[in-house]
Image: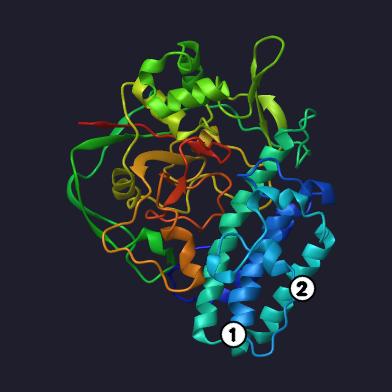
Amino acid sequence: MGAGRIAVTPDLKSRFFATRKLTTDLAAPLSDADATVQSMPDASPAKWHLAHVTWFLESFILRDHVAGYRAFDDSFAYLFNSYYEAEGARHSRAARGLITRPTLAQVLDYRAHVEAAVDAQWNNFPDAALQLIELGIHHEQQHQELLLTDILHLFAQNPTFPALWPEPVLREATPDVAPLEWIEGPSGIQSIGYSGKGFAFDCEGPRHKVLLQPFALADRTVTNGEWMQFMNECGYSEPRHWLSDGWAWVQREGIAAPLYWEQDNEGRWLTFGLDGLRAVDPAAPITHVSLYEADAYASWAGARLPTEAEWEVVAEMHDPDGGNQLDAPCAVRPSASQARALFGNVWQWTGSAYRPYPGFRAAEGAVGEYNGKFMSGQFVLRGGSCATPRGHCRASYRNFFYPHQRWQFTGLRLAKDV
């Protein structure tokens, strides 16, 4: 995926193999058919994710740093390259679901082959290769979240609403939702962007000064219950709160509720997750909403979305490994009890366009293609989600999607001027 600041740590080898194992564990319940089908062009088949992160390692580490290494299969570079122009021609993204061969079993063999080759060469790798392994870990963690969200979207197309993890899930007691409170953030001249010795993607820097007017962030994310009030007060049918593009999207697509919500015969709202269909929990954070929806809700609530700079200066005072994040295979859902954590549960839309920071320079070579060339037409999200592997996030971490997209675990936290 993207290039970044890379510092090799002593536990690199154990983290590498733990990351690889978690990916295969997440995919373990899937059949070959589950892993092959593509539900929409924005999503990729599970089998493709499993192979793509392996192709990344094979290409940029084994091929480039192990003399005499021979590819597992010469066709895989064409099938499993994502968007690296420097790596040559590739299969159409929208047609990834047509790759019925190799099978899931063959892709898992590919993963095992590459892992064994990396293990065998570990003590011979130069620093440049070890740095790329660090990058490969973070790349694979991003695809672990995409793997889960893409499976969720795929299973949601099935009218039987199958569960990936059908075993009973411990239900937390629904807490009382305390009134939203406001926390004033630092204002004046502040610094944002990554600075340090650990890993960060290149789009997170350079660190630079910003001027912030007095502002406050909500002490929690918006809940399902609050979203229901928005819906009941004609939130989806009243154009005055919507951006022009957002209102056109609502009208064109017939949007009337968050993604994966539907009403039963008695009018109760249900939501689909990786553990199946269940009643909407009013206390849990709203998720699977677009930037358009988040912005309209903020307008309706008499507030606004935070800028990414506002969010980051507050986040620097919080633990990025806290909150509800992914630790092991499970039916990930936003947690009502973790709604006040700044990190985890749901990615939080900001009102900031995804653009380069002052002084940004994309890395040289193919690994520099990911971040810089996508800095157009997208908005920044912050904070991670219940599907983000714990340890992957930082205060400076910049996720980004187009304003209509909502199949990720995307929600919102309000902001206001003070």
In the image, what residue occupies the spot 54% across and 55% down? Answer: 390
Q: Position of residue 402 (x, y in %)?
A: 47, 41
Q: Is the residue 63 above or below the residue 139 in the image?
A: below
In the picture as drawn, the residue positioned furthest to the front comes out as 89
Q: Is residue 4 left or right of residue 91?
A: left
Disc ID at residue 73: 2
What colouring style does the render use? Answer: rainbow
Task: Label 2, secondary structure: give it.
Answer: loop
Q: Position of residue 400 (x, y in %)?
A: 45, 47
Pointer 2 or 1: first along the chain: 1
Question: Residues at badges 2 and 1 in contact (C-beta under 8 Å)?
Answer: no
Disc ID at residue 82: none
What is the three-letter code of the residue carrying label 2?
Asp
What is the three-letter code of the residue carrying label 1?
His
> Can you see residue 319?
yes
Q: Position of residue 72 (x, y in %)?
A: 76, 75
In the image, what residue occupies the spot 76% across and 46% down? Answer: 37
Residue 187: which quarter of the image?
A: top left
- The 10 Å Cα crowd at callout 2, few under 14, some 14 to 19, many 20 or more, is few
- The 10 Å Cα crowd at callout 1, few under 14, some 14 to 19, many 20 or more, is some
Q: Position of residue 266 (x, y in %)?
A: 69, 9
Q: Is residue 340 left or right of residue 262?
A: left
Name the one closer to the observer, 55 or 85. 85
Task: Label 1, secondary structure: give it.
Answer: helix
Q: Is the residue 5 above or below the residue 66 in the image?
A: above
**The C terminus - image quarter:** top left
Q: Is the residue 359 above or below the residue 33 in the image?
A: below
In the image, what residue occupies the spot 60% across and 50% down? Answer: 145
The residue that label 1 is drawn on is 65
